[in-house]
C-alpha cells in the first residue's frame, strides 16, 4: 500500500472530520533564476543562481465555525545552501463566533498601512533570504483571541516560539561582508527562542479612515550583530534583545487619495554601535490612483512615502532617512500585465536603490515575473572608520540582479 | 334648501372623486418625464426589496478585437441594505477564483449614496487587508469591459432620470429612460436604459463616457425568476463600441437567503474568506 500525504492527513484528522470530508488542495510551483551582472565581492559567490520552490495549501472547513489550514513551503537553491529552506507558513485552526475568534497554531498576521516599509508589522519574522523586499514572512506559532467590535477589532496574541531571521550563506549573494552565523544566535533572555512574547492591537474604522494602536513585548524580530571568530574567519552572530514596542497606524481617505502614517516607539533595542537607545521611527505618505489613464482601461497608482528613523546613522537599516517614489501601472489587458517601479532615495547621501518588476499571466495557471533590483548606487558613509546605517547598503553594491520567475498554480 | 343641500352633497362627492381620481392619476402617470423616469427605477427597486441576500458564480470571458480570450472566475455575494436607510446601500463581497494566481483575493464594498463607497481588498499572499479608495468607480474590473460602477449595487438616488419613450427591444415592450450619474467620479455622463414593461427588468444599456461618446453597450439576457419574485440575469454582455473589445459575464448558481449578516461583510470577515 502506498502511503501518501492524503493517507497521513486522513489518519491524523479522521476523528474530527468523519462527518464532512472535504479538503481543498492547492499548490504553487516556482522556477527562479537570478543573474548578477557585477563581479562579486566575495570569492565563493557566483554570478547566477537557480532555485525551485513549492508551496502547498490544504484547507478544511469542519463546520461554519471551525476551519483548518495547512501551508508548507520549501525552496531548493542550487547555489546557496542557506537559501535552501523550508517553512510551515500556516498550520492553523480557527474557531469563530460573532463575538470572539480563537486561533491556534502557526499563522501569518500583517499589521500596517504603508507600502514601502512596514514599521509596525512585528508578529512574523521576515523570511529575508526569500526576497530582499521584506514582504516574505516565516510562519509564527501563536494563540490568538480576536474580539470584533462595532467597526473595529481587538486582538490579543500569545507568541510562544521565536523564529530567527535567516540570512544568505557564504556562497550566496545579497549578504553582509561577514557571513551571519545563524547556528549560534545570542539572546538577551535566558529562555532564548522559547521566551513567550505577546502583543495586543486595537483597530477602529472611521468614516473616512482608520486608526490602530498596538503593543508588543518580547524578543525583537530585528537582530543586532556581534562580531566573533568562526572556524576560520570572523562571523556575525545575531543578537536578539528583549524589546517593548508601541505602534500607531493611521489612514485617511479622500477621493482617490489615501494618506498613510505609521510610527513606532521601541525600547530595549541596542543601536548599530550596540548602545542602548530608545527610539521613534516614522513612515508616511500618500497613495494616489488614476483610473482609465489616456482614455484606456489602464490604471496608474502612485505612492510617495518618507521614512525617518530617530537613530539616523546608528539605525539598524539603511532605510533610515529615505524618500520612496513608487508606481504601479496596470495594463488591464487579457494577461493582467502589471509594471511596478520603486525608487528609494537616501535623504542625506546620494545612495538609492531601484526596483522594477513586470508580471504577466498566461492562461489560468501560469504567471511570469521579471524583476530587476539595483543596489549599486550605495556609496557608503563619509567616515569609513565608523560603521553606519549607510554602510549596510554599501555591502550590497555589487548585488544588482535580474530575476526571472515562472509560477505554475494548481 | 333641501334640494340645494343635496346638490351640495353631490357636488362635494363629485369633487372628492375627481380629486381622488387625480391623485391616483398622479401616482401612476407623473406629470413630467423626469418623474416618470425616476418612478420606473423606484419600481425596479421596489420589486427587488426583501431578497435579503444572494450569491452567484460568475464566469467572465474577456475578448480583444482579434478574438483572443481570457477567463476570470469570481464569486459574488450581496447583502441587501436597510431599506429605510437614506445613506447606506447594499454590501457586496467578491472573491476571485481564477486566474489562479489571484485566487482567494477578495473585495468588500459598502455602498453609500451620499459619499464614496467603502472598499477593502484582501491579499491572501500577504495576509493583508488593504483599504482602497472608493472613488475607483470608473476603473476597469480585472481588465474587463465592466467598470467597478457597472457591477456595484445601484441606488435610485445615484442618478437623475428622464423617460424618453417606449420602444420594442428583443420583442419586448420597453420603457426607454436616460439616467445621469450624480457622482462626478462616474465614468459616464449618461446612460440610456431599456426596461421591459412586463417585469421591470433592465434589458439593455448604452453608456456615454465623459466626452459624451457612445462607448459601451450592455445587453442582459437569460433572466430567471427566483423565490417567485426576484429576476436575475444569466448573461451580461458588454461590448466596447470604440475598440471592439468585449466581455461576457455568465452567472450561475444563484442561491438566495443564506441568512448572511453584516458580520459576513465586515472588514474583519475578509481574513476568513475562502
Image: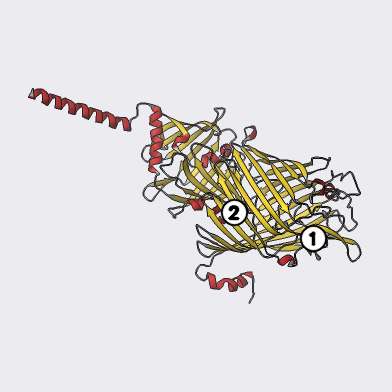
Residue at 76% across / 52% down in the picture?
Answer: A132
Residue at 57% across / 46% down in the picture?
Answer: B120
Distance CA(mark 1)–CA(mark 2):
38 Å
User: Disc 1 on helix, strand or loop?
Assistant: strand
Mark 2 = which residue? B104
The residue nearer to you, when weighing B225 against A341, is: A341
Q: What is the number of callouts on the image?
A: 2
The residue nearer to you, when weighing A297 against A278, is: A278
Q: In which image quadrant can residue B221 be found? A: top left
- Give left or right: position of B220 versus A254: left
Q: In which image quadrant can residue B160 be found? A: top left
Q: Position of residue A151 (x, y in %)?
A: 53, 49
Residue at 88% across / 52% down in the picture?
Answer: A40
Cβ atoms at labels 1 and 2 below 8 Å apart = no
Display coloring = secondary structure
Pointer 1 local density, CA inside 10 Å: few below 14, some 14–19, many at least 20? some
Give above or below for B174 relative to A318: above
Mark 1 = which residue? A239
User: Disc 2 on helix, strand or loop?
Assistant: loop
The chain that hosts pointer 1 is A
Q: Position of residue A328 (x, y in %)?
A: 68, 41
The chain that hosts pointer 2 is B
Pointer 2 local density, CA inside 10 Å: few below 14, some 14–19, many at least 20? many
Rendered-image quadrant of the N terminus of chain B? top left
Amino acid at each position: 500500500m502506498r502511503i501518501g500525504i492524503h493517507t497521513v492527513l486522513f489518519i491524523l484528522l479522521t476523528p474530527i472530520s468523519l462527518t464532512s470530508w472535504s479538503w481543498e488542495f492547492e499548490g504553487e510551483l516556482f522556477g527562479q533564476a537570478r543573474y548578477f551582472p557585477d563581479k562579486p565581492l566575495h570569492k565563493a559567490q557566483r554570478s547566477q543562481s537557480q532555485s525551485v520552490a513549492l508551496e502547498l495549501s490544504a484547507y478544511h472547513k469542519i463546520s461554519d465555525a471551525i476551519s483548518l489550514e495547512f501551508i508548507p513551503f520549501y525552496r531548493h537553491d542550487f547555489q546557496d545552501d542557506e537559501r535552501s529552506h523550508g517553512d510551515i507558513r500556516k498550520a492553523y485552526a480557527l474557531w469563530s463566533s460573532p463575538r470572539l475568534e480563537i486561533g491556534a497554531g502557526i499563522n501569518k498576521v500583517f499589521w500596517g498601512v504603508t507600502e514601502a516599509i512596514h514599521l509596525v508589522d512585528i508578529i512574523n519574522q521576515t523570511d529575508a533570504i526569500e526576497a530582499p523586499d521584506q514582504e516574505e514572512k516565516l510562519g509564527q506559532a501563536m494563540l490568538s483571541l480576536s474580539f470584533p467590535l462595532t467597526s473595529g477589532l481587538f486582538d490579543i496574541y500569545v507568541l510562544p516560539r521565536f523564529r530567527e531571521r535567516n540570512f544568505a550563506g557564504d556562497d550566496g549573494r545579497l549578504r553582509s561582508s561577514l557571513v551571519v552565523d545563524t547556528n549560534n544566535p545570542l539572546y538577551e533572555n535566558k529562555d532564548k527562542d522559547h521566551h513567550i512574547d505577546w502583543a495586543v492591537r486595537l483597530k477602529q474604522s472611521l468614516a473616512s479612515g482608520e486608526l490602530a494602536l498596538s503593543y508588543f513585548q518580547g524578543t525583537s524580530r530585528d537582530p543586532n550583530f556581534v562580531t566573533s571568530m568562526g572556524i576560520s574567519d570572523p562571523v556575525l552572530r545575531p543578537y536578539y534583545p528583549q524589546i517593548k514596542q508601541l505602534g500607531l497606524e493611521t489612514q485617511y481617505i479622500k477621493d482617490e487619495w489615501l494618506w498613510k502614517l505609521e510610527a513606532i516607539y521601541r525600547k530595549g533595542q541596542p543601536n548599530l554601535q550596540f548602545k542602548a537607545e530608545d527610539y521613534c521611527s516614522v513612515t508616511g505618505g500618500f497613495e494616489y490612483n488614476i483610473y482609465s489613464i489616456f482614455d484606456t482601461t489602464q490604471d496608474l497608482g502612485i505612492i510617495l512615502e518618507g521614512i525617518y528613523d530617530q537613530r539616523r546613522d546608528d539605525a539598524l537599516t539603511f532605510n533610515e532617512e529615505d524618500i520612496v517614489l513608487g508606481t504601479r501601472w496596470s495594463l488591464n489587458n487579457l494577461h493582467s500585465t502589471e509594471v511596478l517601479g520603486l525608487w528609494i532615495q537616501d535623504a542625506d547621501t546620494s545612495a538609492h536603490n531601484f526596483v522594477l518588476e513586470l508580471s504577466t499571466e498566461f492562461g489560468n495557471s501560469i504567471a511570469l515575473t521579471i524583476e530587476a533590483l539595483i543596489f549599486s548606487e550605495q556609496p557608503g558613509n563619509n567616515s569609513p572608520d565608523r560603521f553606519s546605517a549607510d554602510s549596510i547598503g554599501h555591502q550590497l553594491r555589487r548585488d544588482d540582479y535580474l530575476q526571472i520567475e515562472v509560477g505554475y498554480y494548481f | 334648501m333641501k334640494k340645494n343641500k343635496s346638490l351640495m352633497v353631490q357636488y362635494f362627492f363629485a369633487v372628492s372623486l375627481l380629486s381622488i381620481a387625480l391623485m391616483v392619476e398622479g401616482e401612476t402617470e407623473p406629470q413630467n418625464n423626469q418623474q416618470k423616469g425616476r418612478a420606473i427605477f423606484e419600481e425596479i427597486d421596489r420589486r427587488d426589496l426583501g431578497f435579503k441576500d444572494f450569491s452567484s458564480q460568475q464566469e467572465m470571458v474577456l475578448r480583444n478585437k482579434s478574438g483572443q480570450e481570457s477567463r476570470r472566475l469570481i464569486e459574488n455575494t450581496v447583502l441587501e441594505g436597510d431599506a429605510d436607510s437614506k445613506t447606506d446601500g447594499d454590501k457586496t463581497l467578491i472573491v476571485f477564483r481564477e486566474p489562479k494566481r489571484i485566487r482567494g483575493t477578495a473585495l468588500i464594498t459598502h455602498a453609500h449614496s451620499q459619499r464614496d463607497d467603502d472598499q477593502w481588498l484582501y491579499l491572501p499572499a500577504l495576509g493583508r487587508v488593504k483599504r482602497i479608495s472608493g472613488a475607483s468607480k470608473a476603473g476597469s474590473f480585472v481588465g474587463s469591459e465592466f467598470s467597478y460602477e457597472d457591477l456595484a449595487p445601484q441606488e435610485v438616488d445615484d442618478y437623475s432620470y428622464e423617460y424618453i419613450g417606449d420602444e420594442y427591444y428583443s420583442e419586448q415592450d420597453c420603457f426607454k429612460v436616460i439616467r445621469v450619474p450624480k457622482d462626478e467620479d462616474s465614468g459616464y455622463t449618461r446612460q440610456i436604459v431599456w426596461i421591459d414593461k412586463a417585469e421591470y427588468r433592465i434589458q439593455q444599456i448604452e453608456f456615454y463616457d465623459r466626452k459624451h461618446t457612445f462607448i459601451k453597450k450592455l445587453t442582459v439576457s437569460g433572466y430567471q425568476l427566483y423565490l417567485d419574485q426576484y429576476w436575475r440575469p444569466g448573461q451580461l454582455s458588454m461590448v466596447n463600441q470604440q475598440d471592439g473589445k468585449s466581455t461576457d459575464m455568465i452567472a450561475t448558481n444563484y442561491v438566495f437567503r443564506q441568512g448572511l449578516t453584516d458580520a459576513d461583510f465586515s472588514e474583519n470577515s475578509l481574513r476568513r474568506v475562502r
